[in-house]
């Protein structure tokens, strides 16, 4: 059973979700090759391998430094 404060929080969340669903949405699907998005691919694989939930990173994970300095790095020329 929920306490009154837990129930109120649930109701607030549902109301916010209903508001968001009323927004005028548009979406565009763009294919990005895995090699061009290596940092996101690395993070996704790391999350699955470690079974971690939400994590706020203050610095890159071990193994990401080479990816971040790779050919698709913002100062590396390719975009």
Image (spheres, rainbow, N blue to C red):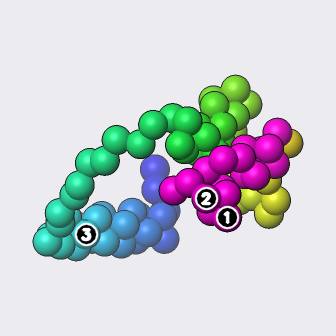
Quadrant of residue 78 in the image? bottom right
Span highlighted in magenta in the image: 63-79
Image height of 15 relative to 56, above or below: below
Residue in the foreground of this view, choosing between 18 and 28: 28
Image location of residue 53, percent across then percent down: 64, 44
Residue of label 2: 77
Residue in the foreground of this view, choosing between 42 and 6: 42
Crowd class of label 3 (few under 14; some 14 to 19; many from 20; radius 10 Å): few
Crowd class of label 1 (few under 14; some 14 to 19; many from 20; radius 10 Å): few
Tell me which secondary structure the magenta stretch mostly adopts: loop
Q: Viewer-nearest of labels 1 and 3?
A: 1
Image location of residue 74, percent across then percent down: 62, 62
Q: Is residue 2 magenta?
A: no
Residue of label 3: 20
Q: Are marks 1 and 3 in contact (CB under 8 Å)?
A: no
Q: Secondary structure at mark 2?
A: loop
Q: Are marks 1 and 2 in contact (CB under 8 Å)?
A: yes
Residue in the foreground of this view, choosing between 58 and 36: 36
Residue of label 1: 75
Image height of 71 relative to 52, above or below: below
Crowd class of label 2 (few under 14; some 14 to 19; many from 20; radius 10 Å): few
């Amino acid at each position: 059973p929920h306490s009154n404060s837990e129930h109120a929080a649930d109701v607030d969340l549902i109301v916010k979700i209903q508001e968001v669903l009323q927004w005028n949405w548009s979406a565009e699907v763009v294919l990005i090759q895995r090699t061009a998005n290596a940092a996101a691919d690395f993070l996704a694989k790391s999350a699955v391998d470690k079974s971690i939930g939400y994590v706020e990173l203050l610095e890159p994970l071990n193994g990401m430094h080479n990816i971040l300095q790779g050919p698709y790095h913002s100062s590396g020329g390719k975009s």
